[in-house]
Image (spheres, helix red, strand yellow):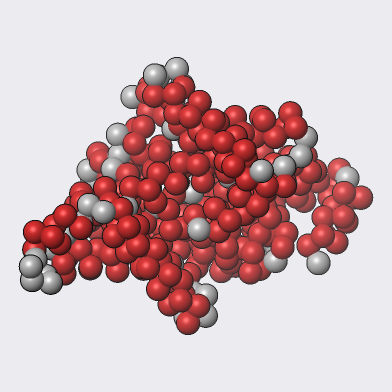
Amino acid sequence: MPPFDPVVWHKLEHVPSVGVGATVAAYVIALRLQRWSGGSAIFNPTLVAVLLLALALKLSGMDYADYARSAGVVTFLLAPAVVLLAVPLFRQRRLIRDSARIIVGSLAVGLPAGVLSAIGIAWLLHADRVTILSLAPKSTTAGIAIGISEKIGGAPSLTAVLVIMTGITGAVIGPIATRRMGVGDPRAVGLAMGIASHGIGTARALQIGETAGAFAGLGMSLNGILTAILLPLAANLF
Amino acid sequence: MLLTEALRVLICLCAGEILSGVGVLPFPGPVIGLVLLLANLALIGEVPHQLGRLADNVLAALGMLFVPTGVGLLAYTHLLRREFAPIAAAILGGTLVTIVVTALTAKRLAESEVKRRPEADREATDAAV
């Protein structure tokens, strides 16, 4: 049997270790790249890994469906990981109690602003229905956004990438915008970045300081949970 | 034990997926699971040590877990090319608007807190330094 028998290769495409291995490898390379870039938000490891794997699929001629099945374990783990977000949130319960007014007020404004500004702009520019629905949960953390997108009829894969682009945008413009507006309170900066740009914004807020990072994490988790509850309910009305 | 904590998480997830799947609740299953775990932790009153370890390790790799879903973008390249302008505008404009209005609201609330409770604010400022 020749070493590169295409029939053998075709069978290998379905072996989980191929898809899982390729995903972990791409992510590790992406993490290294980000470290080399000095932690730049633009070298987001998820986005870089997605692009590397997309390129690998194009070059090898492997079907996305085969890869997705082979890497299914990774995708499955996203669900328990979302459940585990309860742990950091519960650890911050004192912070939530002490700053309840600021947190609730920021969410009451930031959550609808995030959803409505995105779908409003896309709708005004005549975007497709699927684009608008995929954009709606863009400010929530990807694991939650993918679930919302599925529930309201968006395209989860498209949502995953739009979420990352939103995170990068918020991480880059968040500190600049808040400084320009003269917002110095680290709680306000953190909440704005976490609510608008989830985990990627939170990572950037952590570089500003511990308080900004903690409030960004809170904003991210609470915004994710509430959006997951409110968006499907709102979508049911239309 | 680590496995018991993993089981706790899986039970919450499974209950969430069932409640979501049979249409009792219209929300994504994992988010219902998150709320169930939160309620469970509130009952216990603290985070069990092994559960904390599990969460820290899994969440450190959270960014990797949606990579395969993201690669599915390949099926949407033509849509992305056609709708590049509205998507870019919605992401840039939408994110800027959200940050501005949220930061201004939080700032206002923080300032009104100073007037109401000067003590509490001094603590918060100390924590910030």
Front-most of residues B75 and A134: B75
x and y, in percent, of residue B98 in the image: 51, 51
Nearer to us in this view, A79 or B80? A79
Q: Quadrant of the N terminus of chain A?
A: bottom left
In front of the other: A206 or A190: A206
Indicate left or right for A103 with A32 as reference: right
Residue B85 appearing in the image: no
In the displayed structure, does residue A83 sit left or right of residue B72? right
Residue A225 placement: quadrant = top right
The residue at the point 56 percent across, 69 percent down is A176
* Rendered position, B31 above or below A174: above
Query: Which residue of the protein is positioned furthest toward the right in this rendering?
Result: B119
Q: Position of residue A217 (x, y in %)?
A: 62, 52
- Specify whether residue A95 is in view: yes
Task: Kindly identify the residue that appears in the image at 88 percent across and 56 percent down.
Answer: B122
The part of the image, by quadrant, that contains residue A18 is: bottom left
Q: State how many labels appear.
A: 0
The image position of residue A48, as x and y in percent, is: 36, 68
Q: Position of residue A88 (x, y in %)?
A: 66, 48
**Which quadrant would the C terminus of chain A be assigned to in this image?**
top left
Q: Is residue A164 above or below residue A219?
A: below
Task: Say which residue appears at 60% left-offset and 49% top-offset.
Answer: B55
Q: Residue at position x 82%, y 55% from top?
A: B124
Give above or below for A222 relative to B21: below
